[in-house]
Amino acid sequence: MIRSRASNERPEPGVLFLVDALATMRGLVTALGRDQEHLVPATVVQVLMEHQEIDGCAIHFNRAAFDGRAKILADLHAGRGMSPPLVELVGRLSMEVIRAGAIRHEPDLFRRTDALTGSLMVVPIRARAVVVGTVAVWGREPLGFEAWHQSLLELSCDVLGLRFLPRLEFGHDRPLRAEGSDGQAGWHGSTPASPHSAQAGVEPAAELPGELDERADLLDAVGFRDRVDPAMRCATRRGATLCLLCVHIDRDAIIRQVPSAWMSEQAVEILGDSLRRFFTQEIALARLTTEDFAVLCEVAAPDRALAIGTSLLEDVGALKIALAGQRLEVCLSVGVTASTSGWESIEVALEEAGAACAAARRQGGGVVAYSARD
């Protein structure tokens, strides 16, 4: 029996998409070879707009990457096909992407605000390990971008990052302003400039709200151990109380709600970003596995550790995550252990917190389990 494809399923990319993608890359390579650097951003926008599923595009550069400032400044250098509210949103998300160095995907903008529709993806431009800016693309249709669109944009950003690598190597000031056909810097085409773009459209977009400005570094397992070991020794000498939280995200439950593993990873990354905001002032935060995070923090008393875990559950419970056109139900399990005398090693601490987290999972998740050491 032949089964028809569900109406909400998207076909896998075929020959036409491949031809379109190759044409886009050919246009990018040609554009990046131009001698007039200030024309490159506008030309890249024009090339990406020729892709059949991209209806709007904007490029921001991180001024701090070029002039050595600590404060991130996302300058709008070129854009086309986006309304002013969308330009404003892209400026905010570009600041976020530059800070985190991670892709931001909004599959259905209407879920975010009634004023916008369609799909949005913001991808970091890197020159070596430095995030020098972002490329944002918008499609009129919700759920319009998939994993292969992300791959194309990442490749485009890699090529674009190579163009500005010499500026980082030789200490040039900053990227030159892009000029449109009307001679104005920054935004060009039929869409007006961002309301926050004084001085010919290259002033930084409005910054994110204060609660998004500070975020903890997200370490891997090795970086976590390197940071935690000296912190544990110092706390033991001072007699301070440390607590370790093991946070498990029920990834299987997320996968059952979205059509692809790629989108489930996007959801986990959003949750990880929420953890970074929640644990801004803590000693160390790490993603240990695809679905497990660990946090080490100093507390006034051991019972405070349980309160932190409970507050985390409430914070994530209030977080609204929508992917693939639907609200996701997210379940966390939190295991907590605390010690004033210190642990023999970080492995012992992780084992205790992990055992508590496993106990929370056996209760169905959505709870905090506490393992008292002292």
Image: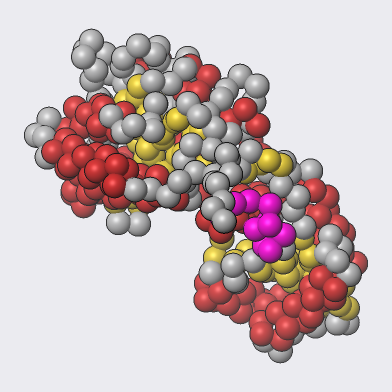
Residue at 34%, 48% (x, y): give it.
Answer: 14
Q: x, y (%) of residue 333?
A: 79, 65
Q: Find residue 32 and report its horizontal and vertical position in percent.
A: 17, 39
Whether residue 207 is visible, yes or no, is no
Q: Nearer the viewer, residue 224 or 232?
A: 224
Please state, as top left, top right, bottom left or bottom right, where the N terminus lies in the image: bottom right
- Apparent side of residue 1 relative to residue 144 in the rendered image (left or right): right
| Residue 190 image offset from top left, x and y in percent | 35, 11
Please identify the residue farthest to the bottom as the structure is shown.
Answer: 344
Give the residues drawn in magenta, as a range: 251-260
Which quadrant of the figure has residue 72? top left
**Residue furthest front in the image:** 1
| Residue 76 in which image quadrant | top left
Q: Is residue 258 left or right of residue 151?
A: right
Left or right, residue 66 beside residue 112: left
Q: For residue 252: magenta? A: yes
Say if the magenta span includes residue 286: no
